[in-house]
Image: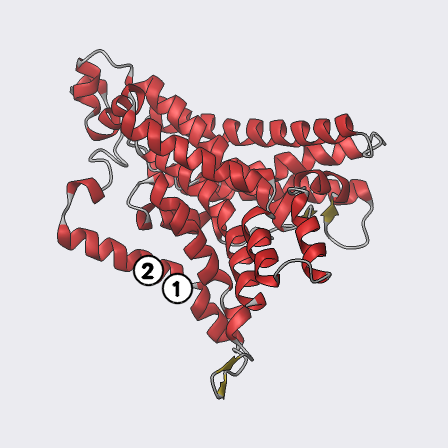
Amino acid sequence: MTLFFSFIRRAVMQGVPLLYGSTGEIITEKSGHLNLGIPGIMYMGAIGGVIGGFFYEQTGADFGLWYVRLFAILIALTCSLVFSCLMGLLYCFLTVSLRANQNVTGLALTTFGVGVGNFFGGSLIKISHADVPTVTLTKTSGCFAKHLGFVDSVNKAAQAGKCPQILAELCQTVFSYSFLAYLSIIIALVAAHVLMKTRTGLTLRAVGEDPATADAAGINVNRYKYVSTCLGSMIAGLGGLYYIMDYASGVWSSDGFGDRGWLSVALVIFSLWRPGLAIIGSFIFGGMYIIHNYIGGQKLFFLTIPKLSMQAQELFKMSPYVMTLLVLIFVSIKEKKEALPPAHLGQNYFREER
């Protein structure tokens, strides 16, 4: 049971960055814009937080004081949001104002974001004179990784035999995450409510379905596209910040983010453009991404599962993409309108053609 609960916790932590990225991309796509630059934006959100945290730690502030820890969180959070918002503004300027091709722009933005992130990360490594090619922000990440205090008390009580071990495991599985993990779920639920239950969400969906009709009704189409894309980029950037400050314990290394940005884009399709379903989907994807670490060398009844080879591990890592393809095929066959993407997704709007 301990191994099972450990797997659940790691799957949740692995899924939180995916949830941030997919929620941000869903908000963007509801306006009719396909932003394939999400991986680069998440990368920029991560390096933004690293830059803010790095220079704040260099001031020599006493992290034993509560307000110093609060400033550390706010500075890293603000830098992450600013960097990712600038990426969203760049994408909007190219695709909304200049009407550049959305697919090409998104891919270019991913390459640009990864390149700029590696450049700044390499510069910080040189400034810190580290022996290894990494930047470690132990103090700042410690501020982000704080969890609810009663979890430790329950664990100590279980070790002393004062409460059942399974209760301690359940408590740790539900309450042992940082505030950014819970914030990702809150943002996804708020986004689901706004998109489906409010006038603003209805207007945004109208822009994505038929911008010409929305424009004729007096809706400022470009404003909605700019706001939704920048907001979605900022949310996605928080996924990169969470990965570095919590999952990676403040350790930055070039190209260490992996393919989680692309998994976020795949999760949008898997969740059928619904932020509520993205919550469940992100944890499923997170579990599938790491399950190869748990099944090798374990006993199943009277059989012992051998450890997986590197090739077999890569096959397990691609399982989220396989599931996305299956969902896409199923949705295409059913042709249910509520399960389809916005009708104008990926197409630039030319007001002169209205």
Q: Which mark is residue 151?
A: none
Amino acid tagged 1: Ser
Q: Tag 1, which secondary structure?
A: helix
Q: Residues within 10 Å of mark 1 (few under 14, many from 20)?
A: some
Pick the residue in front: 315 or 69.
69
The quarter of the image holding the C terminus is top left
Left or right of residue 26, residue 298 in this image: right
| Visible residue check, residue 148 | yes
Residue at the spot of label 2: 323
| Total marks placed | 2
User: Could you say where residue 349 lies in the image, as x and y percent from the top left?
Assistant: 25, 25
User: Could you say where residue 32 lies in the image, as x and y percent from the top left?
Assistant: 28, 32
Pick the residue in front: 211 or 101.
211
The quarter of the image holding the N terminus is bottom right
User: Could you say where residue 176 lies in the image, as x and y percent from the top left?
Assistant: 61, 48
| CB atoms of marks 2 and 1 within 8 Å | yes
Amino acid tagged 2: Met
Q: Residues within 10 Å of mark 2 (few under 14, many from 20)?
A: some
Which image quadrant for residue 207? top left
| Visible residue check, residue 113 | no
User: Could you say where residue 68 lies in the image, as x and y percent from the top left?
Assistant: 77, 28
Residue found at x 39% / y 22%: 226
Residue found at x 83% / y 34%: 64
Residue at the spot of label 1: 319
Q: CA distance from mark 2 to mark 1?
A: 6 Å
Left or right of residue 351, residue 242 in this image: right
The residue lying furthest to the top in this view is 218
Left or right of residue 312, residue 63 in this image: right
Which image quadrant for residue 69? top right
